Amino acid sequence: MIITTKNGRQVCLRQLHQSDFDNLSDYLQNLSADTKHRFAPHEFDRQSIPELYKNPNEYLGYVAIDVMTNQIVAYSIIKLGWLEHDRHRLQSYGLVPDAHSDCTFAPSVADQWQSCGVGNALFSLICSDLKARGIKQIILWAGVDSDNQKAINFYIKNGFRFLGQFEYNGRNDDMILELF
């Protein structure tokens, strides 16, 4: 799917392919230190990417690619089911894990592409795909930094609700979206 962003650029939104791995590695390496700190679902080295995506029943990747430069400008990873280390905390909110209808979500947008609509458009594509797969709940991967108001606003705008807070390298908010 091709969209035109608020900054007038055309971007292709789609699922990650094996042929994107080098481009994804470049994208991850070029993220700012702050963005890397806030987005850390996996290692940023080239070797980790194919290992992570070897099982399509466990992880899905989605990308936004600038049509002019062929560079990835946004990337999201979905873990089907829950992260095991989050299970106890999420269950404390009354959630019952279901590997078939839950997923865990971690988005990122390159700094110079933030606030131009790429994240919202990519998330819309992801939600459509997840609904077609029978996913009913999207849980934020390791929550969101409580001081990251820009990200919190993005999640609220897209229908997420707060579950609670926890401490890990600072205060974080757990959030969830129920897909209908």
Image (tube, grey):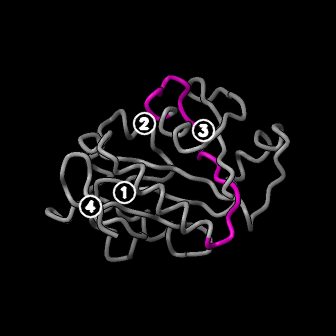
Q: Split into 4 quadrants, where in the image is the C terminus?
A: bottom right
Badge 1 marks a residue whose secondary structure is loop
Residue picked out by circle 1: 45
Amino acid carrying label 2: it is His
Residue picked out by circle 2: 37
Q: Residues within 10 Å of mark 1 (few under 14, many from 20)?
A: few
Of residue 20 and residue 67, the one placed in the foreground of this image is 67
Earlier sequence position, callout 2 versus callout 4: 4
Q: Nearer the viewer, mark 1 or mark 2?
A: 2
Residue 92's quadrant in the figure?
A: top right
The Cα–Cα distance between marks 3 and 2, rounded to whole angstroms, is 13 Å
Residue 9 in the image: above or below residue 163: below
**What is the x, y in percent for residue 109?**
35, 47
Q: Split into 4 quadrants, where in the image is the N terminus?
A: bottom left
Residue 36 in the image: above or below residue 133: above
- Describe residue 63's horizontal placement relative to residue 143 as left or right: left
The Cα–Cα distance between marks 2 and 4, rounded to whole angstroms, is 25 Å
Residue displayed at 70% across by 60% down: 136
